[in-house]
Amino acid sequence: MTSTPANPADSPRADRPGAVGPEASSPEPTRPGRVTRVSVLTIAVALLAATLAPGTASSAPASPGARTATTQAALTWGDCPAAVAAPGLECGTIDVPLDYAEPDGRTIEVAVSRLASTDPERRRGVLLTNTGGPGGEGLAYPAGLRDVLKLPQEILDQYDVIGMDPRGVGHSTPVTCDLGPAEHPTNIPMYARDAADVRSEAIRVAAVAEKCGTSPTADLLPHITTANTARDMDRVRAALGEETVSYFGISYGTYLGAVYTSMFPERSDRFLLDSATGPGGWDHSFSRLFGQGVEDRFPDFATFAAERPEYGLGETPRQVRAKYFELAARLDRAPSPDGYTGAAFRFATFAALYYDSSLPALAETWRALDRGEPVPVPGALAGPTTEPAAPSTPADVAIPADNYIASQLHVICNDSDWPEQVWRYQVDVAIDRIRYPMFGAAGANITPCAFWPSEPAEPQVEITDDGPSNVLILQNLRDQATPLSGATALRAAFGDRARMVTADQGGHLSYLRLGNDCADDLATAFLRTGELPERDVTCGPPA
């Protein structure tokens, strides 16, 4: 999830009449401070949690990198940190205001990388990138685009490809909530069976929010937002000496790109957005879309399993879907010997739907759970919520172990005003359990954002049609992490500024990943020429 946040100033808040269950009128957990916004989910199964947590532990520095001196933004290129070093990749840092309302005040660092154009005579400018999350590190991404995804040579010739660890993330001044791996292992809300589950989850996530508000980097907390990251991007543009920037962002990175080009339309060149969150980013309404996304995507797995009788999960997609509910109900009553609860089973299924390559392991997990056997490779099903780094090297020990989860919480919870009343989540869970029975009661569940210790510092950025026609949205039809409905809403918000290419394929992320020549060629042509299709385009499945 993409990933998953500027947005319409009045973000959707599903006010529902009445309350659900006897817990609805009971006292709510005390907020550690003032409150806001959305999301991350806890997996009770330690096996799953360990897989989802960041891989390297370290203690967090107190307010790392924070200074009071104001410096002119400038980039001096040098070697990259060992954890992200790759041939041809250069790195540097700039200082940016912690609080843009006080531009001459305290500063923090933002780390930037560059993969210079391979043909200076054909060089057009810079292509900024973002790997999603939020919370995804980005310094290694330019090398990953070149070496792993095989970004076409013509694009490598035309652009310096720029990576960035966003504010609060990785080698930029990082934030922490001092969370252990089992305290908050992932970013997707936990499935709630009933109103009592929402109530108990509220107590847990309130404690998570309190830890974020009392961590060594709590003084940075209100300023880790998408709008401020967009302002940082514009400081990077200036430090690079460029009048405009082009951009490629995936998952949550689509929201960051939408915010930047809305705040700075005259400085935006070509913006390619792959797997869109929607115009509100990762707000409460987007979190609820996870339920719809699973309903969209699950038929791909159901067909896969039904065509393979060796798994014994059903002879038809309908029978496979029935097996899902059978296994979930069984595990709700009694966890498996290796610790799978109904909630963990539902989450593992959600996570494996990210990529078709995970479907065989998911089917094996189902088969083992159905037979009461040990699950093979426990916890290996979790689909990544951010891009893998290009080179595989040890992580930097100066980065807090919980930095991905913590920085993600900071952005999501700071970006929009989340409902604060537990009863509202109980109502939403009851509604979405009916609307989207497979996973709706997860996406609608309460998160630490309901107890966040600061209110949004500014209104959300509104995505509108004000600006040049320079945005191409690329979207799979069946994506459980960033569902089609969110991309459609973003397309509508942009109006004539954008075109959308939808591809008849499932899973999360599209460009250069699934062998869809129709979608890939349109995206590459846009980056190369800047020309949008005359109208929205529908591509068939990969050949």
Image: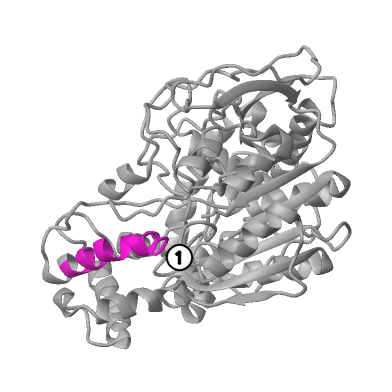
Whether residue 399 sits left or right of residue 284 in the image: it is left
Q: Is residue 20 visible?
A: no
Q: Residue at 51% of width from left, 80% of height from top?
A: 435
Residue 284 higher or lower than 130, as above or below? below
Tell me, what colour scheme is on the image?
one colour
Residue 290 higher or lower than 35, as above or below? below
Q: Quadrant of residue 388?
A: top left
Whether residue 306 sits left or right of residue 496 in the image: it is left
Is residue 361 inside the magenta stretch?
yes
Give the quarter of the figure containing the C terminus. Answer: bottom left
- Residue 259 is situated, as x and y percent measured from the top left of the image, at 75, 50
Q: Residues within 10 Å of mark 1 (few under 14, many from 20)?
A: many
Q: Residue at 48% of width from left, 45% of height from top?
A: 387
Q: Is residue 176 visible?
A: yes
Is residue 365 inside the magenta stretch?
yes
Residue range in magenta is: 351-367
Q: Quadrant of residue 226?
A: top right
- From the image, tell me which residue sits under label 1: 507
Q: Residue furthest front?
A: 121
Secondary structure of residue under mark 1 = loop
Q: Residue furthest top?
A: 69
Residue 65 higher or lower than 317, as above or below? above
- Residue 508 is situated, as x and y percent measured from the top left of the image, at 49, 61
Q: Amino acid at mark 1?
A: Gly
- Residue 269 is situated, as x and y percent measured from the top left of the image, at 79, 48
